[in-house]
Every structure is written in C-alpha cells, then in structure tokens.
Amino acid sequence: MTEVERVNPLLEVSGLSVAFPDAGVEAVREVSWQVRPGETVGLVGESGSGKSATGLAVLGLHGPRARITGSIRLGGQELVGAGERTLRELRGRRVSMVFQDALDALNPYRTVGAQIAEAYRLHHDVKRSEARTRAVELLERVGIDRPGRRAKEYPHQFSGGMRQRVMIAAALVNEPELVIADEPTTALDATVQAQVLELLAELQREMGMAVVLVTHDFGVIGQMCSRVVVMYRGRVVEQGPTDRILTTAEHPYTRALVASVPRMDDTPGTRLATVPETVAALVGPVDEESLADPALRIPSGAPAGNPARPATPDRGPGRSPGGGVGAEPRFGKGRGGEDPLLQVRSLTVTYPGTLTRPPLKAVDDVDFAIAPGESFGLVGESGSGKSTISRVLLGLQRAGSGSVHFDGEDITRATRRRRRELAAGIQMVFQDPYGSLNPDRRIGDTIGAALPRGAARRDRVAALLTEVGLDPELAGAYPDRLSGGMRQRVGIARALAPGPRLLVADEPVSALDVSVQAQVLNLLTQLRRDRGLAMLFISHDLTVVRHMCSRIAVLRHGRIVETGDREQIMERPGSDYTRALIEATPSPRRPA
Amino acid sequence: LPGDTPRDRADASRVVIGLSAAVTTLDPMNTTSVGTDLSVLSSVHSSLVTREPDLTIGPDAATSWRRVAPTRWRFHLHPRAAFADGTPLDADVVVWNVRRLLNADNALRMTPNFPSLIRAEKVDRRTVDLITSRPDADLLGALSFLYLLEPRWATRHKPATQAMGSGPYTITSYSPGGTIELRARDDYWGPAPAIRRVTFRITPSEAARVSGLLSGELDAVAGLDPQDLNRLRADRDLRIQRLDTTRMAFIKLNTLKGPMRDVRVRRAVNYAVDKRAITSSLLKNTVDPSPGQLMTPSYSGYTEGLTGYPHDPDRARALLREAGYGTGRPLRLELTVPSGQYVAGELVVQAVAQQLREIGVSVKINSVPFAVYMQKYLQQKAMPDMQYITQAWPTLAAGGLYGLFVSDSPYAYWHDEEFTGAVTRARGTDDRAERDTLYGRAARRARDQAPVLFLFPQPGLHATAEGLNWRARPDDWVRPAEMSWKGATR
Amino acid sequence: MIRFLIRRLALTVLAVWGALSAVFCLLHFSGNPAVLMAPIGSPPEKVAQLSHALGYDRPLAEQYASFFGDALRGHFPDSLTFQQPAMDVVLQRLGATVLLAAVALAGAAVAALLVGLWTGSREGGGARREWPMWLVFLTQSVPGFYIGVLLVWVFGVELAWLPTSGATTATSIVLPAVTLACGVLPPLARVFRNNLRGELARPYSRTGTALGMSRARVVRHAAYGSMLPTVTVLGLEAGALLGGTVIVESVFSWPGVGQLAITALQNQDYPLVLADLTFLIIAFVMVNLVVDLLYGVLDPRVRHQAGESR
Amino acid sequence: MSPMDQRGRRFRPGAAGAIGAVLLALVVLMALLAPVLAPHDPLAQDLAHTDAAPGVHGHPLGTDQLGRDLLSRLLYGARTPLLVGALAVVCGGLVGTLLGLLSGFARGWLDQVLSRLADVQLALPSVLLALLVLTFGGQSTAVLVLVIALTGWPAYFRLVRSRVLALRTMAYVEASLTQGVATWRVLSYDLLPGVRGLVAVTATLDLSRAVLMEAGLTYLGLGAQAPAPDWGLMVAEGQGQLLGAWWIAVTPGLALVALVIGANLLGERLAERGGGRRAARSTVKKTVTARSTTA
Ligand SMILES: Nc1ncnc2c1ncn2[C@@H]1O[C@H](COP(=O)(O)OP(=O)(O)OP(=O)(O)O)[C@@H](O)[C@H]1O
Ligand SMILES: Nc1ncnc2c1ncn2[C@@H]1O[C@H](COP(=O)(O)OP(=O)(O)OP(=O)(O)O)[C@@H](O)[C@H]1O
Ligand SMILES: [Mg+2]
Ligand SMILES: [Mg+2]
C-alpha cells in the first residue's frame, strides 16, 4: 500500500451495475473503483465499454429507464437510490461533469454568461448581478479573452476549444470536489486538446479537486492520470497506477490495448500488434466475452518488460518478403527519374459563398507529387482542407485552379465519361465505416458495383473478400451484421475492386477503436506492399501518419506548411507549426 | 347578450329574423331577390304602391291612383311623404327614379320588370303620371317593386352600399353578407311600425335556421323545409304557418333537343312520378300535387278544373316503348338542380330520378350552384334534358307567368304555336272573360303537351316565436313592419 | 440577418407571384368572365361591350400585367353580387375571420402547450399520462365539418347551450372556434411535445441536470427550444387555418372571408373570387414570413447566421 | 408535419399499428364486399319509411330522408373515399417522389425551380385551390383526384428531396460515384431504397389527408354527387336532420373517422419503425470522431 491509498476515498464505487432492461443492455457490470481527493483517475476502454454509463451513474443522470444496483459513496454518503433532492444538492456543487461535445452540451439558446451564472445561482443564494460577475470571473479563469463581452455571446459563436473551456467554467463555478470529464477533448484538434488538458490540470492543482477523466486515448491517460481503470464490456478488467498499466499490465487485454497504438518512438511501418494476436500470444485463445473477465491474468512466465510488443514484425501469414521501410519507393529518391504517378500543381479550391456565408478558400496553392508505389501522408487539423484535396482527386469536387495530373493526364478537366474510366486508376477508402456502405445492398453488390454482373464478378468479389481477411460468405450479407472494423475492410475491398494504382485513404481509422485501428492499418500496409499500390494517406493523427507514410505533407488552413521525408519532418521540423503539432501529440510515454 | 330571449325582445319591441341568403346590395333597383334583399329594403324605402299580405295592391307613397288614359296612370303622393333626411318625396323624385330605372346604361336588374313603362311626367308637386307604351294591367304590380331613392343623396352616395330612404326603418348596421340591423324612424310619415328594432341574421343552412328557432335565437323564419315540420310543431314556443306559395315547382323539360322533343317521352315521365308520394313523405303533406298547372290559384287568369297526370308506371313504360325506348335503346337523361336554392329541391330530384329509374330510364343528377345553373339555362342556352325549377311572376298575372313559356321566351325551351298564340291574344285583350277562356286554352294545351314534369306548388312553411303576430304571405316577402308582439305596449 | 431577410423576402415575393399567376391562369382558362358578368339575357353586343369595359378583350399578357398591378394595389372590379369594389367586401368580412382564426389559434396554442408539457415533460412517461395524446390523435382523424356537425348537434341543438350560427353574440364564436382549433391542435401539440422530448434528450438538458437544476427548470429551458419548431408549424397551420375557415365558416354561417370565397365561387363572382383569393394567399405568405422572422428573433443561431446549418 | 417527428412517442406501437391495419382492411373489405353484404340496393327509396330509426323496418342502421337503407349506403359509401384517396396518394406520391429524387440528386437550377414550385404550391391554401379548380375545371372524379394529388405532392417532394440531399453526401453514394457506377444505378440502388420507407410512411399518412379532403370537398358539394352513396355527402345530407334523425349524419361520419384513424395509426406505426428496413439503422450509430470546426 502506498501513501496515498491510506487517505479516505472521496468517491467509492463498489459493485456498481447499470442495466437498461428495455433495451436488454447491461452497460456496466459490477464495477468497483475509487477516487481519492485531489487525484486524477483515468477511465479507459473502447467504445461501448460502459465508461460514460459509469460516469453518469455517479450523478444519477440515467433517468428512470436504467436499473442501477451496487453502491456509490461520495464522502461516505450513499448515492444509489438517493432522493432527487439530495442529488440535486450535490450535482454541480460537490460533483460536476464535463461532457464531450460542448456545442451540444451547452444550451444553444442562452448566452454562455447566463448559463454559468445560473449554474452558480443554483447553489448560491446571490443576486443576479453577483452571479454574472462570478461567471465573467470564471470565463477569465479558463482563459477566455475579453470575458465580459464574450459572456454575452452564444455557444455557437465560440470555437470548439473555447466551448469546452466554457463547459469547464460552468462545471467548476461552484468549486466541486470531484469533476467527471467524459471525453472532454475527443472532438478537438491535437493542439487545442493539449491546451484544454493543460487548463484542466492547472485548475485541478489550483482548486484541489479530484478528476475522473473518461477517455479512450492512452496518450491522454499517460499525460494526465495517476491511476487508470480499464474497462471492457462493462467490466473493469484492470486498475492501477498509470506507469504500471502502461508498462506491465497484468491483464492481457490491457497490454494488447497499449501495444496496438502506434507510438512516436516505434519503428514506422512495422506491423502493429492487434488485440486478438497479443492476447493469444499471452494466454492462448480466449473469446471476446471471457476477455472481459478481470480475473484473466497473464500466466507466469510471460515475457517481462514490454511483452505486448511482439519482437518480430513478421507474424502471421502473408508477410511481404522485404518488410521494413527500405522497400518503399520514394519520389525523387530511390527510383530517381521516374515520373510521378500523381502530380498536384498549384491546386486551389474555393467553396462559393452563399447568402449566409462568405466564400472560403479551402485549398490554397497546393503542390505535391506521389511516385508509383509510394505512401504519402497528408496531416493537418480539422478544416485544413485534407478532405477537399481528396475529393478533388476523385472528381467529387471541382478544382478552382491548378492541375492534377494522374499518369501524365490532367484529370481536373476530365469529362464525366473519362472520370468513369479513371475510376480504375484512383480509388478511395472512406472515413466513416457506417456511412460508407449502403445499408440496403448486400456486401457483394457493394464491392462489385462497378463490375459487370455474372459468375466472374462473384469470383472476383470472393477473392477480394479473402484478400481483406473476410469470409467470402459475407458477400450475401447486409452491412448491419458487420462490426466497424469489418465494414472498413469491405470498404477497402470495394476500393480494390477496379484494380487501382493509387489508393486515397481519408482518415480510414479515425472512427475505429484503437484495437481495430491496428488491424486496419496492418491490412493497408500489407495490401500496399503486396500490390505495389501508391497511397495518399490522410489523417489528423501524427502518430498514425508517421507509422504509415514515408513522405509527409503538413497542411494548415488549406496551405502546405512543409513537405518532407518522415524522419526530417519528425526530427527536424522546418516550421513552428509542425513542431507545435508534434509537441501537442500526447504520447503514453510522457510522464504524468 | 345575456337573457336575449324572445320574451326579452318582445318587451323591447325587437325581432330577429333569419334570412336564407346574404343581402348582397342595398340598391333596390338592382336586385330582384324578394325573400332577402327586397324584404330588407322594403323596410327602408317606400314605393308608390305596395302588395298587401292578402296580395291586393295597396297604397304606400301614393295615396291614390287611377288610369287617366289607357296608357297613362296618375298617382297622388302622400302629402307628408319624406325621406329620412327631410327631403320631401315629391313628383320630381318619382320622375328621377323612373329615369334612373329606364336608363339602359345603368344596367339595373329591376328594369326588365317594366317592359311597357316609357317615362314619368310631373303633373304638380304631389302628382305624377306614368306613361306606358301599351295598356298594361301588370304595371301596378310591378310598381310595388319600385323603391324610390332620393335623387340628390343618390348621386352623392353609393346606393349599393348605403341606404337613405323614405321607409319606416333606417339601417343602423350593414356589412355585405353580414347581419343587418334596422331601427324604426321616429319621424316616419306613415303609420308607426310596432316593431322598433330589427335584426336580419344570415343563416344559409337550414339546420342553423331550425336550431336558431328552437333555441330562441330567431323570432321569425320564412321558407322552412317541411322535413322539419314535426320538430318545429313539437315546440310549443313556436307558431307554424303553412300555405301555398305563388311559386310552382316543376321539372322543366328541354323540348328543343334530345329525347324530350317527343311528347310521348314527356308524358311518360309525367306518368312515372308519384307526386303524391313525394308531397306526403318529403313535403309532409304541406302541399298537394299540382293539377297539371304551371301556376297556383293566386294568379289572375288561373284556370280551374284541370287534373294532373296520375301515377301510372305501366302507362309510362308503354309510352316509352312507343317512343322507341327499351332494353335495346335505354333512355338516359340528365337532371340538374341548383344546390341549396329551393326548398327540398335536392331531395325531390332524387326521388324523381329514382322513380324514373324504375321505369327503366337512367337519370344522372347534377347539383350545381344557382349562378352556374342560370348561366347554362339562360345564357349558354344549354339546358339539360330536365331541370328542377320553381317559377313565379311577381305581379301574380297569368300573362306574366305564361310569358315564360311562349316560344320566343329564353325561359321556355318550348316552341308551341297554339300555346303561344293563346297567351299572346289573351295578353292583348281587355275583356276579362275572353282572356280567361284563352288562358284556359293555354293551360290545357300545356297540360297536354307537358313541357314540364308537373309537380306541386312550393310549400310555404313559416315559423314565428309564439307571441309574434305576423301573417305569413304566399309571396316571399318578410316585412318587419307587418309584425308585432302580442300585448306589446308600443 | 439582413441577408436572411432579403432572401426570405425574395422567396415571399416569388410565392405570391406564383400563386397569383396560378389563380390568373385558372380564371382565364375557364372562358371570358364578361359572359358571366353581363346581366341575364344580354345580347352579344352587350357582352362584348362589358368585356371591353373590363379589359377582357385585351391580349392575355397585357391583362396579366394589369392584373398584377391591380392585385398588389388591391384594385379589383366591383363584385357582381355586392356591387361594390371586391376588395372592400373582402375587407369588411375580414374582421370576422381574423377574430375567429385568432381565437382558434390562441386556444389551440394554449391547449397544445398544456398537452405537450403534460405528456412530454415526464421522464419515462407511462401510459397514464398519454391519454391527452390519444385525444389529440382522435381529433386529428375527425374531419373538421364532422366535428362542427357534432358540436352543433350536441351543444347547439340537444343542449341548446350555444348559438350555432352567425356572429351575433359573444358566445357565437365558441363552437366555430373550437371546431377550427381542433384542426390545428394536433400538429401543434405533437410538434411541441415531440420537440420537448427531443430537447430534453439533448445533451444540454442533461448538462442542466448535472449542474443541479430541478426538473421543472430543465423542462422550462427545453420548452423554449421546442417553441421554435412549434412556431414554424404554427405559421404553416395559420395558413391551413385560412383554408379550414372555408369549411368551418360555412358550417356555422360565420360571416368571414372563407364563407365569402364559397359564395363568390358559387355565384361566379369573378372579381370577388379574385380579391378573396389574392387576399388569402398574401395573408398566408405574410404569416409565414412573420413566423420566419420570429424564428430569427427567437433562435440566436439564426440571428447571428454563424454559417452553420442546424 | 414530418412523419419523422413522431418518433419517440409511446403509443404502444405494435397494438396500435395492428388496429390501424385492421381498420383499413375493414374499410377496404366493406368497399369490396358491398354487393354481397348490403341488405338493400343503396339507391332504392322507400318513401313510406323515411327517417326510420336504426333497427326499425329491417334497416339495421335506419333509413334516410328518402327511405334508403343506411347500412347499404354505408357499405357502398366506402368506395369513393377509398378510390379517390388511393388514386390521389398514388399520383401525388409518384410525382412528388420522382421530382424529389431528381431535385435532390441533380441540385442546381432544376432543384431551385422545383423547390420554388413546391413553395408556391404550398402558398395556395389547399381547400381554396380545390374549390377553384373544381368550380372552374368541372366536377368529376378525375379532377377531384388531380386536385387532391396536386395539394399533396409537395409533402413527398420536400421529404424525399431533403432525404436525398442527405443521402447524397453519404459516403456510400460518393463511393458509388467514384467507382464509376452509372447514374441511374446510383439513383435506383443507392438513393431509392433510402427513401422507400419514408415514402411509404408519407403515403399512409397522406391517405388520411386525402380522405379528409375528399370528404370535406364532398361536404361542400364539390365531390361525389347525389344520389351516389358517399360518406361526406351522407353527412352533408343528414346534417339538417340531426335533431330528429341524427343517425343519418352521425353513422357515415363515424365510418369516415374509422378510416382516417386506421390510416393514421398505420402510418405512425410505420414512422416509428423508422420508415425503412436498414436505412434507419445505419444512422443510429454515430461516429465518435465528429470533430468540430471552429465557428
Ligand atoms: N440509455 C441507454 N439505453 C440503452 N442502452 C444504453 C443507454 N446508454 C448506454 N447504453 C449502452 O450501454 C453501453 C455502454 O455505453 P456507454 O455510453 O457507457 O459507452 P462508452 O464506454 O462511454 O462508449 P463511448 O466511448 O462510445 O462513449 C453501450 O452498449 C450503449 O449502447
Ligand atoms: N461543401 C462545402 N461547402 C462549403 N464549405 C466546405 C464544404 N466542404 C468543406 N468546407 C469547408 O472547407 C474547409 C476544409 O474542409 P475539409 O473537409 O477539406 O477539411 P478537413 O481537413 O478534411 O477536415 P476534417 O479533419 O474535419 O475532416 C472547412 O472549413 C470546411 O468547413
Ligand atoms: Mg461515452
Ligand atoms: Mg475530412
């Protein structure tokens, strides 16, 4: 027992279960964990693992349709089954909550000042004017410029990061003892995320409150939390100090989770460990359901140190012979003199203004080129124009000026018919695994949409499904039977169907859980090598781009800030912006 | 208004009268709707002569009159007759009004009722002569429709929307199509009416009229549907008056084209319909079937002693067979009825159609707005095979009504030399006996040739609150000046 | 906001133009109105003369142009039945309709608010609180004229509590207004209630609870948000109401523009039909314009035009 | 009101939907089996037994002013509202859906023109428009159907258009486009299935609107003509007799209400189920990384 653990816990959750009988869902099953005063506890797990459900249960926010059993004690006071009055007294005052998307979490019809002031007046018997003053004070405290004026503005007039600050201000206006922050930065850009997290940490130090940080990002955990609770399928599989969890977790799932995230310090292009593989390596085959069992400890004799990171990149069937980075062709290097496959010159795209919106130059004078077989990364924050560029390449968006040459042909001026033919050259993998499959068509029809019907098509579809690691039988299924990762594989199979030479992947993994993300990244790497595909890989996540691409362009406000080799960009960034981006990227390795 | 019952109104000498259609204009020369527009306007204006409830012609602004020459009538005006603004009603007023009436540019709707009138001449301040182009026995009747405007007022105001007259009442509130309020003039030169305040309420739906009567919202309603007779009778607070109107209901047959050209078909349809069944069930015995006549006994020149077509379906079928219709060549007819215009019209038409169906004639019923109906009838000259219509002649002269059936009348759709000849000669003669003989010949000819499917007089069913004295009239007039509350002080 | 206004006004003008054009076409495809306007039995010369006087012999394009000029200035020929400028007749009848519509709309809005709050605010709900919605559902399924007929039967005839026709006493308005309100209540109540539920399910309502607000307070904030779509529906319903008055006014002999439209059509009173329709169309479009502007006032997001669509 | 608004209601949907379907089926059966079920000729008059109360003289529902058997008239009277309603829904639905698909897919000027057309259509109060058309265009079943369809199409158009606009930006539609799939295939495979359910819901609810409108117009004398048995007309005919013979007007009105309730219940049930087999479900799951842009 360490020193801290002897202090009485502030919040003690024990044997908590949350079920939704109507929906037949058991969201949380008998979880127990504690928060001590002043500490930061991370609640981590993939989507649907019950993180939010746990957090909401603490404040009794589930409504009458949830069945909550077990015990939640706040400073000794039992909250499960407590009356509405009791809960109302402590909500916002002793325990506060910060929600994910502050645009929705703030009342769109009221000024932010009024909302913070109201939150204050709910627990303090003060005059309106006094509450207003307090609101302005808090806005200033969370770092909002000219707080007096901005207090009179509405949430939609604030940027995403500022809204999250406002949300924090509203949560902290009564100086609570505990703040539950439910994915407070998931919707934010890396640089903004860093600022918000820093603010939270700073306020915590200042006010001495405890924080429960719900997240699925190990980077954020590593940076913020002293202790971590790992959830899987409604169960707590493991909890403990951050350092230990990140290095020598006891539960195979935790280890696999940590290992499957690409990191700033690993070898790019190597195969990422995936959860099933890792778990199998550690404890032998386990099905998904029993993986949730916290008692599933790693048997003695497992490799120590960093067991979750398999030593050899070449695991499993179908390894490419060369492996490693060196096999990747690079434009201008390696295969000097060869013509680029794709050449983008001074590309500019302007979205026309409407009556309510001024015109927007989304892409501004962008140049880059991709060699055959090369993997080129495009990184940038939200709204920087990444998707717009990809849409131009695919003919979904007209170029304003500039040119895009594919195989020497300017495709910005291609006719509709020519475009259809070009489809065999460039294909796209979409971001959203749910929206990118027609829910009313069978998988086989989706993959073979552009192929002539017949037995040949059936065979081709089956081959493609096998290639992306899916059962060919799935050709007859509808997408609603598929998980996110499987859908993304279908999307990749569809893109491969016409036999393209360039694959445009626009944020192909950002909608996926980390455990699935690794599988898809591995698949893309492998396909690229096997087929010699060139790839334009678009992401906002520097670690992922670093992992996937040998050359990288950094985009900001529609302009390319810099282009260069991976090593050069990562180690010797040529611009302040790139440097800031690298620094803002949380890494699990950084000290808490 | 709290406590607004017939009793309360009786104490205040007020009546509320339900009208079946909106009052559309206040210009008395530009309307011929007796039951609505003119009933209101007759209370506001005065005419030279007026038709009394017993249908005789009595004095109004003129105290006496006589024919000074075959085509010249002399009228002596009431010495105190005057308009509400004090202007006396004198010979100049009459002259001006006749000029206004006869000026074709004004396109007034009353004008066609005065086919023989040429002009008016002032004799002295209170005496005026009216001159006709030919001797015209119907002039007095027509004059009972001619309401007099004040010349100077009329040129400065809009007579269509405003009124200032010499009658017993003034209008206190009017909006087109809305409720109308009248108040008795204290300075009226004639006998003071017993009812001091009048409200004309527009109640186009029969159901509203009946429920208004039953609930005591309305004091008097004329022209009710006999279907409601039993219910109205059951209410002891109501007094029901039933009489034959001067309006004859029949189904006009288009003898100019189509199957109705054949007199056998016309007779067949007359035989096919059981009029008695209709009058007893649909009209609750309020009227008797017509004895094959185009007018009611109220008319001068009415012919006694005719009998109607009996109900004889076999005969009807035989006639149709004779005319060449049968299973191989079915007879299809179109029957039009103006919607909501005539008492029980739509029901009667359905009963007739069904009875014709029973002799193997298929009938298609068209219910159309009255304006459309009239337009087809008179302007487009496209009357269907049959149409339900009721007709009356305001002056209650056989010559006038028969005039609607002579060959050159746009109303006739029947070209019959014999009938037209008889009527023309009758209208030209002054000899009463000869005239009646001629009209008798015309009546028999019409009965025989059946230009119409004879039905029955339009029933006149009137209801008033118990205690309201009002002698219902066979013509459509509803005049508050003829009403009084029993035991009222004023 | 200015741009929004301009855009909205442009749409309004467009709608009025289109609707009036439709009316114009309908009238002129059905023949020469002068034939109908001439007194019965008029000879052809007379008709031609009248046709000329009213301009019906001019080229259609010219008539179309002048029709617009006149319509927008409210100039129409004299009504055939009322023998005075058609617009005057419409305006004199207007008060009754506006009164009826306003009373009905206000009543429906209040009822919708109550029903919505009652059935939409409680978490979980429960079948026992649902009965007003069933009532609303029933109302929605009953034809307006039938409601009117039943009301007349029960309250006017059998019980004789209320007047059944005309606009004479203060109580005259009750039955027609109730009938009319029955047509508007269902959409209003449902939109308000569904949106209230929607707003209550939105994260900001949960935030309110998390900050320690009472349920009543949370509902109050949510109710504000649900007012916006409700107001939009209110505007649309105000338009439907104008159509609904046609039937209700004729059931209850209410002397308004709806009944006027019917009698004018039946009497083939072209100028009056034109004036009445023009008026109703413009009124409908204006009501919706006002509603949209109101929306702008109520919703800060529209007010600021942040460029983000909802 | 968009049928989608009805989501989240708690009408015990299963039972309600079934009741709706049964009511509708009953009315359809009435219309179809009228010749078998009706005890009398719906047109046959018996002037000796007018206004007979229900149950008297062998008339289960009584007789009307002309002594016609009300049960028989009620059975036959189902035909016009159903026929006119169904035809109007089909016409309006087809036109609205087609134009909505085109408008949403093609966008640009075509979309502008069609959308403004729908606006104009909506600006014309529908009852008045119907009155106008029926008075000047002549009264016939065809015109009646057309005018009801005319006032109905904008609802389909707007819903389908906005759904198509939304679907168009769905990645799966863009994927088809980038794959070079023919336009008509995109329309029929990717977009049509997405609006099918929506159209079904709208059509069912539109049926109740069409039936109500048919009845209303008939009540005003612009629909079916006497002596044809038609529910709206029967109410109008019996209205004057409420005091003595309430059954003449009340029974056909109840039948009308049953029909409309049936259509409404069924429509709302469909709407609750999301109006589409799979289309709805795909939108249920929202992606986590909807990263916000700055305002
Ligand atoms: N109100 C509800 N009714 C029914 N099921 C629910 C409800 N709320 C949550 N669930 C289910 O409970 C499970 C846990 O949900 P929860 O929101 O806690 O997940 P999470 O870990 O926060 O995931 P995410 O990272 O996606 O936010 C999920 O399967 C979810 O579908
Ligand atoms: N159809 C459009 N019309 C107008 N503006 C658009 C349109 N699509 C995108 N934009 C704007 O263009 C800019 C660039 O958008 P784009 O989608 O290319 O960014 P991104 O880098 O892909 O961002 P994200 O990471 O959020 O996907 C953004 O400000 C966006 O709001
Ligand atoms: Mg969550
Ligand atoms: Mg993007």
Image (cartoon, rainbow, N blue to C red):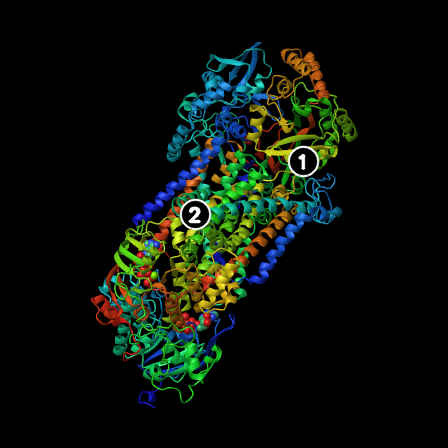
Which residue shows up at 47% across the image and 39% down it? C257
Residue with the most extreme top position: B69
Say which quarter of the image contains residue B383.
Answer: top right
Residue A401, above or below A465: above
Q: Which residue in the structure is indicated by mark 2?
A: D103
Asked if residue C107 lies left or right of residue B386, the reply is: left
Q: What quarter of the picture does the C terminus of chain A occupy?
A: bottom left
In the rendered image, residue A233, in percent from the top left (x then y), is placed at 45, 76
Residue C257 in sight here? yes
Which mark is nearer the camera, 2 or 1? 2
Cα–Cα gap, marks 2 and 1: 50 Å
Q: Which residue in the structure is indicated by mark 1?
A: B350
Q: What quarter of the picture does the N terminus of chain A occupy?
A: bottom left
Query: In the rendered structure, are the residues bearing label 2 and label 1 in contact, judged by CB atoms less than 8 Å apart?
Result: no
Question: How many residues crowd around disc 2 within 10 Å: few (fewer than 14), some, or many (20 or more)?
Answer: many
Q: Chain of mark 1?
A: B
Q: Chain of mark 2?
A: D
Question: How many residues crowd around disc 1 within 10 Å: few (fewer than 14), some, or many (20 or more)?
Answer: many
> Callout 1, which amino acid?
Gln
Which of the two residues, D226 or A296, is positioned nearer the viewer here?
A296
In the rendered image, residue D194, in percent from the top left (x then y), is placed at 48, 56
Residue A295, above or below B127: below
Residue D248: which disc?
Answer: none
> Callout 2, which amino acid?
Ser
Tag 2's secondary structure? helix
Please give the count of numbered marks on the rendered protein: 2
Mark 2 residue's CB less than 8 Å from ligand 2: no
Asked if residue A412 lies left or right of residue B347, the reply is: left
